[in-house]
Each structure stands twice: as C-alpha cells, then as structure tokens.
Image (cartoon, rainbow, N blue to C red):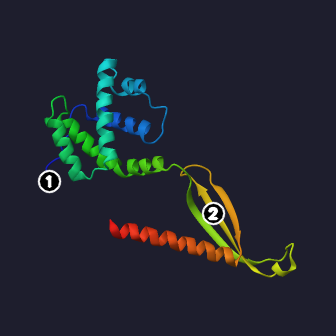
Amino acid sequence: MAAPEQPPPEGSKPLSGLLGGIAQAAYYGNADITEELLRGQLYPETAPEEFHALRAKMGGLLQSIASADMDLNQLDAFLTAQTKKQGGITSDQAAVIAKFWKNHRMKIHESLINQSRWDNFLKNMNWRVDLKSQSRHIDQINTPVAIVEMELGKKGQESEFLCLEFDEAKVSQMLKKLSEIEESMTLLTQTT
C-alpha cells in the first residue's frame, strides 16, 4: 500500500503564487502583476518592506535558475546550497521552488528565447515558378521566374509578408550564397 501523499508545507500556496506572479511579470510580459497586487493577494498580513525583501529574494533565485536553464540535478544542488547559506531559504521554500520550476521550466525557457530575439524571424516560406507573360523587353517573355513569399514576424505578433521575384541568374546567385552560409555553419559546428 502506497504511503499517503504528504500535505503541502504551510505557506507553500502563497509562495507558489508569488513565483507564478514573478514569472508572469518577468517572463510572460503581464504588466498587470504588480508587487502591491501580489502582496495584497498572497501576503496581506506581511509588512511591505518584508514582502519586498521576499519578492526580491525569490525573483533573484528564479532569475538565476531561469538564466542557467537548470535541469533537475543542477536545481537540486543550487537549492541545497541556498538552504545552507546564511539568510538563504528554508527547505520548504526549496521544495516549492523545485516543484514550480519542474512545472514551468519549458514555458519560461521558451519565453526567454522569444525575448532574446532582436528582430523578426522567418515563420514560413512559399515559392513557385512562373513564366513571364509581360515585360518591357520582348526577349524576357516566356522566361521562367521564381516567386518567393516569406512570412516574417515575432511570435504572438502579426506577420509581415515579403514577396521576391528571381530570374535564373538570381536563383543561382542566391543558392551560391546559401551554400556559403551552410559551409560556414558546418565549419562552426564541427569545431565546437
């Protein structure tokens, strides 16, 4: 017979909520989550200075954990060190942080990656080959052209579309440049 599951430590729900609020504000861009809101909802009996210190400590720990993208072994070692440190955290707090990270690691990691993108990225690309039916120069009629449509954007934002037309020479030039990029990337990945 399996042992009954232990009840969560006293104060784990407010701490879990605080970590969730910190994540919402820091990683998911929810500006509505303020320190005052978190204190009022989770720690109404706590003095503002005391809550500010707790929030700063938990925010710093979560930032360290997230920026290192700690796996569960690294997290365990990190939290154990934090419990032994003067002015650190309790073992109950460490358990709550570990559970929170286990449940939110992938989403926070994805958010950090999206925040670190400084510009648009290629979401999709479509192409087709047409024959030119109109041109200023008669010798260009019925020549093949590649039409390339690229969808550019940031996750969660509306896309922009870029449409390009290439003749055979431009396609060859583009393929040569892409081949050079591929060679450079291969060289970099082989040396690391």
Q: State whether residue 115 is above or below residue 36.
A: below
Q: Position of residue 61 (x, y in %)?
A: 28, 38
Q: State whether residue 81 is above or below residue 48.
A: below
Mark 2: few/some/many CA within 10 Å (<14, 14-19, 20+)? some
Name the image quarter holding the C terminus.
bottom left
- In the structure shown, which secondary structural element does the residue marked by tag 2 occupy? strand
Mark 1: few/some/many CA within 10 Å (<14, 14-19, 20+)? few
Would you say 167 lies left or right of 105 here?
right
Give the amino acid at mark 2.
Met
Would you say 29 lies left or right of 122 here?
left
Q: Residue at x 77, y 81 (%)?
A: 143
Task: Answer whether labels 2 and 1 touch (C-beta < 8 Å).
Answer: no
Q: Residue at x 60, y 57 (%)?
A: 152
Query: Sequence-wise, which precedes: disc 2 or disc 1?
Result: 1
**Residue holding disc 1:** 2
Res 86 quadrant in image: top left
Question: Is residue 133 visible to us here?
Answer: yes
Would you say 16 lies left or right of 155 here?
left
**Residue holding disc 2:** 150
Q: Residue at x 83, y 77 (%)?
A: 133
- In the structure shown, which secondary structural element does the residue marked by tag 1 occupy? loop
Q: Nearer the viewer, residue 6 or 183?
A: 183
Q: Position of residue 39 (x, y in %)?
A: 37, 24
Give the amino acid at mark 1.
Ala
Res 128 quadrant in image: bottom right
Q: Nearer the viewer, residue 118 or 26?
A: 118
Q: Nearer the viewer, residue 100 or 168?
A: 168
Res 85 quadrant in image: top left
